Amino acid sequence: MFPPHVRTPEAALDYLSTWCDIIGGELLDGIEWEEIADATGRLAVLRVPPFRIGFRVGTVLTIAINMDADLAAHFYKFDFRLTGGALCWRHDCHAGHESLGAGPYHRHLGPGEDHRVADQQQTLQTIFEHVTAGNLQRSWRTD
């Protein structure tokens, strides 16, 4: 999920804030997180609840991530929609669609919610590229 130089939960949260600045758009919600400990008191899950970034071209990216102490993301959702609510795409990592053959990784292709295809694990870099491409495509539309 994160570049190799990001190795601690604190660094991951700092990087996520920087990533939001770099991707452009307006942070519509604050970035919050919750540290969930295991029975021994050690960090088990770092949960980043959903937050949104709005873009001038009429799109919104909603992000939610759960990662372990080693920064491995066992759940994520990157949901990219038009401001009016129509789904462009959503990259997910969660159990439940094993029949697609890609483990927990899949992508929903809009405008409907139920068109799923196998996907590969995403990183913040690949999501940045997908969002940038989608926003560039929207900026060239004439409708």
Image (cartoon, helix red, strand yellow):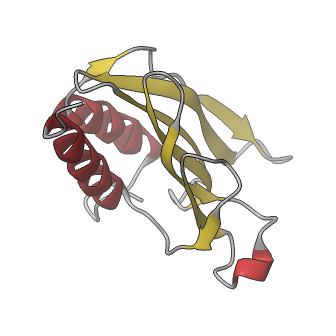
**Quarter occupied by residue 105:** bottom right
Q: Does residue 67 appear in this view?
A: no
Q: Position of residue 98 (x, y in %)?
A: 78, 77
Left or right relative to 101: residue 57:
left
Left or right relative to 63: residue 42:
right
Q: What is the residue that sits farthest to the bottom in this orientation?
A: 101
Q: Residue at x 77, y 64 (%)?
A: 95
Q: Is residue 63 above or below residue 93?
A: above
Q: Does residue 19 appear in this view?
A: yes
Left or right relative to 117: residue 56:
left
Q: Position of residue 18 (x, y in %)?
A: 23, 34
Q: Is residue 68 above or below residue 32?
A: below
Left or right relative to 62: residue 14:
left
Front-most of 67 and 129?
129
Q: How many marks?
A: 0
Q: Residue at x 48, y 21 (%)?
A: 84
Front-most of 11 and 95?
95
